Amino acid sequence: MTKSRTKMEGRTARQWSPRRMAGMALLLAGIGVCLASYTARTVFLTNLPPFLPPVGRELQPTATCFRVATFGDFGARADSMKEVVQSFSDKVDFAICTGDMMKFAVESEYGHVVTELREVMKCPFWAIPGNHDLCSPNSMETWRRFFGQDFYHWSYGDTLFIALNTAEGKLPEEQREFLRSTLASQRERYRRCVIFCHIPPIDLRPKESHCLPAEEAEAFRETIAGHKIDLIVSGHIHQYMEGAFAGVRLVHLPSSGQSIRDPDNRMFGYAMLDFKADGTILVKQMDVTAETGRERLAFFASTVLSHKPIIFVSGLALIAVGSILLGMHGIAIDRISYIDLRPAPVNPARSDHQRQPA
């Protein structure tokens, strides 16, 4: 009887060794520990106070020297955003985000972002939308509920601030008229003027075009022509750069959490705007952290997931040891026996009916 025939006609029984059983136990335990490293907490979206901008308001009218933090493009990454905000929150007079705070732009994600921002933001804070903030149905309505108007102006001290919504890659006629009328009625009252937007009118990087289409950029240029604009600040590029558009100083902000496009600087951060009493505006890139972490704000089921890396790594170690034990082969690991289920053969030479000798 051959071994192959036994396998075909019999039943195979595998006897697991203690070492292999221990490997399976460690593997399952490791998976359980990895899952346990994630905790979920529910965020209730009702009665969340919105971050309403100071539309048309005059704040601190006598101030001539103040500081502003501007950041953006963290794409619902709570860990990097918190580090960035905590680094400036108690050092500035106010902060403004140039958009892309969300990833999927659903209502529960908005609730999570607002909740996380309120935990760390200690200064007045306002925002304008980015393309990722308005990428789902009804997201404009959701934006206005949590952050108020999507384009507006206000003043702080001797400076006029204008916030535009270029998230859809254009400057609609409604906003052109708003920009024209605001500059016509307000610009001469203030010493300085700064414009914020998400998608910039031009991309300062060579051979790149993550910016408004040429015809929209030209409309932007024509609208601000004849008015002294001191600075334009934009997001969207994920790389700090300085240049000029229409004779105006243009600054691209670094990423505060999403992919970094600067090959020479892998740090997440923001830009500090230092408004001096002599009328100058100093702009400085502020590097904060190179760590993105692994906590991404959940956008589903009104739940935010938090991750504990140490516990997760411990689970991976258990999985690795268990896999090694399961992968070992040899007699010491398991023993295979073949049980022959065929009826015992009858020996014709020794039949019960065979006549015995006298």
Image (spheres, rainbow, N blue to C red):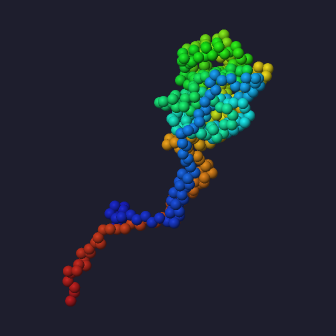
Residue occupying image coordinates x 55% and y 48%: 40
x, y percentage for residue 210? 58, 23
* Picture coordinates of residue 156, whole percent (x, y): 70, 24
Closest to the observer: 17 or 125?
125
State the residue in front, 231 or 322.
Answer: 231
Q: Position of residue 308 (x, y in %)?
A: 61, 49
Q: Quadrant of residue 279?
A: top right
Q: Is residue 229 visible?
A: yes
Residue 177 locus on image (x, y percent): 57, 14
Q: Is residue 274 left or right of residue 233?
A: right
Quadrant that contains the C terminus = bottom left
Q: Number of callouts in the render?
A: 0
Query: Residue at left 59%, top 47%?
Result: 307
The outermost residue toward the bottom is 358
**Which quarter of the rendered picture does the N terminus lie within?**
bottom left
* Residue drawn where x is 63% and y is 51% of the image: 310
**Residue that protrudes farthest toward the top in the picture:** 226
Q: Can residue 100 be seen in this snapshot?
A: no
In the rendered view, tell whether residue 287 sits above or below residue 59: below
Residue 227 picture quarter: top right
Question: Going by the picture, which residue comes out furthest to the right?
Answer: 278
Residue shown at the point (61%, 16%) measured from the top left: 179
Q: Looking at the image, is 350 positioned above or below residue 72?
A: below
In the rendered image of this protein, does residue 356 appear above or below residue 190? below
Horizontally, is 32 left or right of 346 in the view?
A: right
